[in-house]
Image (cartoon, rainbow, N blue to C red):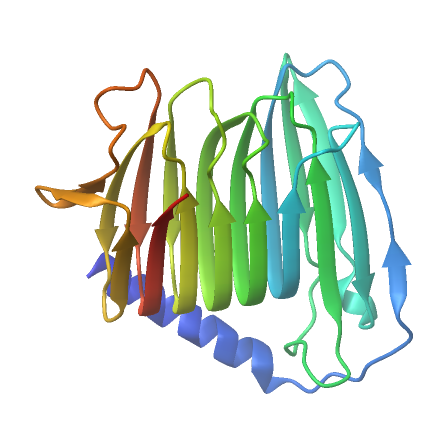
Amino acid sequence: MRGSRGLLVVVMAVFVGGCGTQTAGELQSDSPSVDLENARSVRADLRMGAGELKVTGGADRLMEGDFSYNVAEWKPKLNYDVSRTTGELSVRQGQGKGIPGGNLRNKWDLRFNDDVPTEMVVEMGAGESDLDLDSLDLTGLTLHMGAGKTTVDLTGDYAHSFDSSIEGGVGEATVRLPSAVGVKVNAEGGLGKINAEGLQRQGQAYVNNAYGDSDVTLNVDVQGGVGQINLEVV
């Protein structure tokens, strides 16, 4: 029932967001960056209503981004605060009706520092997202996707165990998993389909060959909606 309620909320949100008409304006571009300051770890909260989202590593600072949009109300809002040794980063899409398509554009390209322990929370409404997180020092991942297509790369040689939660909506989600790090996936497809390539069933879960033998374990909880979930061991 939890998955059904979540799916209903997603579908309603996408419908309401698309009810208003929106006129494309001049394409605007912003390239902000955020310094780590004195934080030793970070929690990054990314919320995009609709568009194209790409997240990778390789930044010299805590975060470096490129934003392009042609609806003024979609201008992203950034906020960063440090409490003791923990940084709290928030990147949120500005309010505005309509879904990108046709002449409407909304694209985020975010790069994070590979050496900073980072917990990441991503909420994606409608569109496409590519989360290439294999180089990051992840301490946790929570992903809520609405309608569209999502790819998540968790194939890094992680030094410590962490938990990931991925909740799908309407569309397709592909999760790439490591072979050298132990992986345990609890997956529920809802009304969709689950493809588990390179994984074996262990009770109600899926595990890779390294599970139980490696010092590090990646625990993944996947809740699907209407669509397809692809689990791939790379």
| Image x and y of residue 151, in percent | 50, 55
Residue drawn at x 32%, y 15% as measured from the top left: 215
Image position of 12 with respect to 193: above or below: below
Position of 229 relative to 17 (above/below): above
Residue found 56% across the figure and 48% down from its top: 131
> Where is residue 139 drawn, in percent x and y?
48, 26
What's the residue at 69%, 29% (across, down)?
Answer: 113
Tally the marks: 0
Please, is residue 44 above or below residue 199 in the view? above
Res 9 quadrant in image: bottom left
Direction from residue 81 to residue 28 in the image, left or right? right
Query: Horizontally, is 182 left or right of 142 in the view?
Result: left
Classify residue 60 by image quadrant: top right
User: Between 14 and 232, which is closer to the camera in this rendering?
Assistant: 232
Q: Residue 5's quadrant in the figure?
A: bottom left
The C terminus is located in which quarter?
A: top left
Q: Is residue 131 left or right of residue 163?
A: right
234, 32: nearer the viewer: 234
Residue 53 or 22: which is nearer the viewer? 53
Which image quarter is the N terminus in? Answer: bottom left
Position of 57 relative to 212 (above/below): below
The spot of residue 164 in percent (x, y) is 39, 38
